[in-house]
Image (cartoon, rainbow, N blue to C red):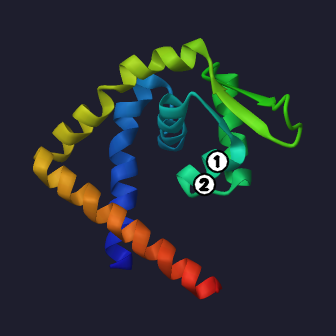
Amino acid sequence: MCFALTVASRGIVSAYKPVLDPLGITHPQYLVMLALWEHRTLDLSTLAKLLHQEASTLSPLLKRLETQGLARRQRSSADERRLEITLTPEGEALRARAEQVPIEMARRLKMTPEELTALHRSMLELIDASQRSLEESQD
């Protein structure tokens, strides 16, 4: 299972590259943008939890998105310790172009909507199971 998941993950990320290149973003940046398109503004710790990443891993990625003009980082006025990430108008505009990404990926993978839905459901179940296992081992 471990080998298959690793190879599948690498393969999917590689398959995204030619689809995301015209948008000017990488796969990790795309994942951040998906979260921001859904929530518009997120604090760094919430974003890290949503993406199952460490905040320190996201910081350089967010800096690049800010340099590209797609997102803005600023300290919360309510709590200076919190770093808020907000979409810029350019980041919001990119959403329309990015809506074709899932369609193009499904086409490239040559999988039916039913197959993709079943795979997605199985992956979510695997994520939940691995999270439960991790939490139980920390107790």
Q: Nearer the viewer, residue 44 or 107?
A: 44
- Please state if 95 lies on the left or on the right of 123 as rendered: right
- Rendered residue at 52%/44% (across/down): 28
Relative to 26, residue 112 above or below? below
On residue 95, the disc is none
Which SS class for mark 2?
helix
Residue 123, placed above or below residue 84: below
Q: Amino acid at mark 1?
A: Thr
- Residue at 71% x, 52% y is 55
Quarter of the view holding residue 39: top right
Answer with left or right where residue 14 lies relative to residue 76: left
- For the point 19% across and 46% down, the residue is 109
Task: Verify CB contact (< 8 Å) between mark 1 and mark 2.
Answer: yes
Location of residue 53 in the rendering, given as x and y in whole percent from the top left corner:
61, 56
State the residue position of label 1.
46
Instruction: Residue at the far front: name it.
Output: 78
Where does label 2 land, which residue? 49
**Residue type marked 2:** Lys
Q: Position of residue 89 (x, y in %)?
A: 58, 12
Q: Residues within 10 Å of mark 2 (few under 14, many from 20)?
A: few
Asked whether the viewer can see residue 111, the reply is no
**Circle 1 sits in a helix, a strand or a loop, which is it?**
helix
For label 1, count other residues whose C-alpha is less than 10 Å away and answer few (under 14), some (14-19) or many (20+): few
Q: Quadrant of the N terminus?
A: bottom left
